[in-house]
Image (spheres, rainbow, N blue to C red):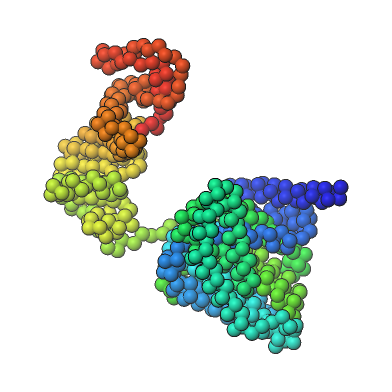
C-alpha cells in the first residue's frame, strides 16, 4: 500500500507538471510572449517558492536536461559533417572570441562588485555560457535555425559546449590554489586527452557501427525496437561524453551529426521528436521552480544590479564581436539580445565551485538567481527588440530598377512558373523584359544568366516604366491570386491592346480571370498533374496509349465542366468530376449534357462526383 501511495504521489506530480504547461504555454503564446516564458512562469508558480507543489526542483532538472540533449541531437541530424566543416571559422573564431572577451569583461564586473577573484571568474564564466535550450527554442519558433544568422548562433553554442572541460578544470585549479579539496582533481592535459579520446570514439562508432546496427534492427520489423535504439544512441552518447568531461548536449549533437547522412535519419528524427518536446518543456518548468524568491527578496538590489550589469556588459561585448566578424548592425544587435543571458551550465559550474570551496553558498545562490532571471528576461528582450527595430531595409546593390524597358513580351513575376514559361520564348529569340519585387530572387536569377529588373507589377507607374504600353503580350506569373487580379485590372484598363496571359492559382481564380477578359489563363498545376497521373498509370502496368486516352478524357471532362462553370458558377457540372465514393445503385440512367447529347452514368458515379470543394483543381 505504501508503494501504491508513493506511485500515486508521483503520478500526481506528473499530472501537475503537464497541467501547468498546458495551461501556461498557450496563454503566453496568445499574448505574444512565447512558450519559453510560459514554461518558466508555470514552473515558478508550482515550485517550492510558489504554490509549493514541488519541494525538489533539482531532481526534476536532472531528468529534464535530457530534453536539451535530444534537442541538440535533432539539430545535429540537420547538420551534415561537410556543413559543419564550413562553420569551423564561426565555431573556433567567432565563438572562441565571444567567450573569451565576455569572460574577461564579466570577471571585471564581478570584481568591482566585491567578489573574491576566484569567485568572480567562476561567476562570470557561468554567465558567459548562454542557455542552449532558450536560444535554440527561440530560433526554432522563429524559423531561423537554418538561416545564416541561425547557423552562426549554433556555432557559438557549440564552442560554449566545448568550453565546459576547461572551465571545470579551472575550478579544480583554483581549488588547489585556495587550499580546497583536490583529491579528485587531475592535470588539465589529462582531462583534455580524455575528452579528445571520447570524441574520437564517438566518431569511430558513428562511421562504422551505427548504420549496420540500425540495418540489423530494421530487419526485425519491430518499430518499438527502432525507437528504443534511437533513444539508446542519443542517451548513451550523451552519457559517454559526460563521463569524458564534456557536456551531454555536445555528445548528443555529435551523434546527430554522425547520423545525418544515414538512411535512417528521418525515422530517427520522428522517433526522438516527441520525447524532445516534452522533456524540453519540463526543463524550462524546472528552471522556473529553481528561482529562490527568498534570496531575491533579501538581496533584490544586488541581484537586480547584477542582472542589469551582466546582461548589459555581455550584450555590448557580443555586439562588438559580431561587428568585428562583419555581421551587419541588425544581426549583431539581435545576437546580443539573444545571447545576453546566463545558461543552465552555470548551475553545474557553481555547484562544483561550492563543493571545491571556490565559492560560498550565498554567492552561489545569488549568481544562480541572476542567471535564472536573465533566462526569463530573454524572451521579453527579444519581443521589445522586435518592436523597437525598424523593418530591415533591402539592399539594391547589383539590382536595376525597371525604367524605360522596351520588349515584345513583359513577364511580371519570376518564380519557378515564369522561369519555365520564358524558355521557349527565349529560344525563339523573342525580346522579353522581366520584373520581380523579390530582391533575392533577382540576384539568384542573375547567377543563371537572367536579367530581371526590380519592379512592383501592381503599380501603374512601374508598368509604364517596364514597357507595358508597347508590349504585344503581358504575362502575369505571380503566385498570389489577389495580386494577379489587381494587375489584370490595371492592364485591362490602361493597356487594352496587349495580349494578357495569366497564371491562375485554382479553378475559382480561373473563373475570375475569364470574367475579367484575359486572353489566356491556366491553372498552375493542371497540366503537370495530368502528366503526373499519366506516368503513374504507365508504371502501374497500363498501356501507354490507354494512359494517354485516359488523360485526354480527364482533360476533356475538365474543359466541359469549366465551360459550364463559366455560365453557371463554381457548382455547375459537378457530375463531370470522377469520385471514388461507392454507392450500390447499378441502374444506369441518362444525364443531360451540354449540346443536347446524353451521357450515361450510374448513380454511384454521379454521387461520387459531388465531392468537389471550392478550391478544386
Front position in the image: 482 or 494: 482
Q: Quadrant of the C terminus?
A: top left
Instruction: Kindly tell me whether residue 614 is visible in this rendering.
Output: yes
Q: Is residue 280 above or below residue 330?
A: above
Identify the residue at horizontal 65%, vertical 68% (top origin).
371
Q: Is residue 382 above or below residue 350?
A: above
Name the spot of residue 419 as percent of width and height, x first: 26, 49
Answer with left or right where residue 590 lies relative to residue 187: left
Name which quarter of the figure residue 326 lies in.
bottom left
Answer with left or right where residue 114 lies relative to residue 160: right
Q: How many marks?
A: 0
Front position in the image: 516 or 55: 55
Q: Is residue 391 above or below residue 250?
A: above
Q: Residue furthest left?
A: 429
Identify the residue at horizontal 21%, vertical 47% (top origin).
422
Name the spot of residue 596 as percent of width and height, x first: 26, 12
Identify the residue at horizontal 52%, vertical 50% (top origin).
219
Name the spot of residue 605 as percent of width and height, x first: 39, 20
Name which quarter of the figure residue 247 lies in.
bottom right
Identify the residue at horizontal 31%, vertical 55% (top origin).
441
Front position in the image: 431 or 235: 235
Answer with left or right where residue 617 lies relative to residue 473: right
Front position in the image: 480 or 176: 176
Name the spot of residue 383 as percent of width and height, x first: 54, 57
Q: Is residue 287 above or below residue 219?
A: below
Instruction: Kindly tell me whether residue 303 is visible in this rendering.
Output: no
Amino acid at each position: 500500500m505504501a508503494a501504491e501511495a508513493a506511485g500515486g504521489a508521483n503520478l500526481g506530480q506528473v499530472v501537475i507538471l503537464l497541467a501547468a504547461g498546458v495551461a501556461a504555454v498557450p496563454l503566453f503564446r496568445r499574448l505574444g510572449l512565447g512558450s519559453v516564458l510560459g514554461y518558466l512562469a508555470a514552473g515558478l508558480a508550482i515550485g517550492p517558492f510558489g504554490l509549493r507543489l514541488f519541494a525538489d526542483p533539482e531532481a526534476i532538472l536532472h531528468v529534464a536536461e535530457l530534453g536539451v540533449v535530444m534537442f541538440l541531437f535533432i539539430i545535429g541530424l540537420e547538420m551534415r559533417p561537410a556543413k559543419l566543416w564550413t562553420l569551423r571559422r564561426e565555431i573556433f573564431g567567432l565563438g572562441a572570441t565571444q567567450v573569451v572577451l565576455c569572460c574577461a569583461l564579466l570577471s571585471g564586473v564581478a570584481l568591482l562588485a566585491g567578489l573574491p577573484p576566484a569567485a568572480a571568474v567562476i561567476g562570470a564564466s557561468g554567465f558567459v555560457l548562454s542557455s542552449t535550450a532558450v536560444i535554440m527554442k527561440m530560433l526554432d519558433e522563429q524559423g531561423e535555425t537554418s538561416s545564416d544568422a541561425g547557423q552562426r548562433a549554433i556555432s557559438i553554442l557549440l564552442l560554449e559546449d566545448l568550453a565546459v572541460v576547461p572551465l571545470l578544470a579551472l575550478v579544480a585549479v583554483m581549488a588547489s590554489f585556495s587550499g580546497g579539496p583536490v583529491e579528485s582533481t587531475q592535470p588539465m592535459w589529462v582531462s583534455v586527452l580524455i575528452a579528445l579520446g571520447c570524441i574520437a570514439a564517438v566518431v569511430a562508432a558513428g562511421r562504422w557501427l551505427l548504420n549496420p546496427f540500425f540495418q540489423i534492427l530494421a530487419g526485425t520489423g519491430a518499430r518499438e525496437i527502432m525507437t528504443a535504439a534511437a533513444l539508446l544512441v542519443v542517451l548513451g552518447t550523451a552519457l559517454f561524453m559526460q563521463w569524458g568531461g564534456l557536456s551531454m548536449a555536445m555528445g548528443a549533437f555529435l551523434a546527430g551529426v554522425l547520423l545525418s547522412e544515414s538512411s535512417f535519419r528521418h525515422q530517427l528524427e520522428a522517433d526522438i521528436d516527441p520525447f524532445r518536446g516534452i522533456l524540453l518543456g519540463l526543463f524550462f518548468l524546472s528552471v522556473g521552480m529553481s528561482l529562490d524568491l527568498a534570496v531575491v527578496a533579501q538581496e533584490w538590489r544586488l541581484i537586480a544590479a547584477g542582472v542589469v550589469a551582466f546582461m548589459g556588459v555581455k550584450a555590448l561585448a557580443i555586439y562588438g564581436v559580431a561587428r568585428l566578424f562583419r555581421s551587419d548592425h541588425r544581426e549583431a544587435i539581435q545576437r546580443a539580445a539573444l545571447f545576453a543571458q546566463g545558461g543552465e551550465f552555470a548551475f553545474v559550474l557553481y555547484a562544483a565551485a561550492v563543493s571545491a570551496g571556490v565559492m560560498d553558498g550565498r554567492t552561489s545562490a545569488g549568481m544562480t538567481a541572476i542567471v535564472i532571471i536573465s533566462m526569463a528576461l530573454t524572451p521579453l528582450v527579444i519581443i521589445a527588440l522586435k518592436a523597437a527595430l525598424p523593418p530591415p531595409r533591402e539592399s539594391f546593390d547589383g539590382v536595376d530598377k525597371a525604367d524605360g524597358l522596351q520588349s515584345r513580351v513583359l513577364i511580371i513575376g519570376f518564380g519557378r512558373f515564369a522561369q519555365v514559361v520564358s524558355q521557349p520564348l527565349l529560344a525563339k529569340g523573342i525580346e522579353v523584359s522581366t520584373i520581380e519585387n523579390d530582391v533575392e530572387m533577382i540576384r539568384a536569377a542573375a547567377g543563371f544568366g537572367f536579367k530581371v529588373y526590380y519592379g512592383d507589377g501592381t503599380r501603374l507607374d512601374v508598368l509604364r516604366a517596364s514597357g507595358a504600353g508597347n508590349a504585344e503580350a503581358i504575362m502575369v506569373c505571380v503566385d498570389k491570386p489577389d495580386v494577379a487580379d489587381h494587375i489584370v485590372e490595371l492592364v485591362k484598363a490602361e493597356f487594352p491592346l496587349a495580349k494578357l496571359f495569366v497564371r491562375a492559382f485554382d479553378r475559382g481564380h480561373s473563373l475570375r480571370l475569364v470574367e475579367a477578359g484575359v486572353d489566356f489563363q491556366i491553372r498552375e498545376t493542371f497540366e503537370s498533374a495530368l502528366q503526373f497521373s499519366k506516368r503513374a498509370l504507365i508504371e502501374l502496368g497500363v498501356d501507354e496509349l490507354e494512359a494517354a486516352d485516359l488523360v485526354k478524357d480527364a482533360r476533356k471532362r475538365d474543359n466541359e465542366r469549366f465551360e459550364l462553370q463559366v455560365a453557371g458558377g463554381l457548382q455547375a457540372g459537378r457530375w463531370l468530376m470522377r469520385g471514388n465514393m461507392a454507392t450500390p445503385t447499378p441502374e444506369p440512367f441518362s444525364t443531360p449534357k451540354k449540346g443536347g447529347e446524353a451521357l450515361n452514368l450510374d448513380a454511384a458515379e454521379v454521387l461520387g462526383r459531388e465531392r468537389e470543394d471550392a478550391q478544386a483543381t
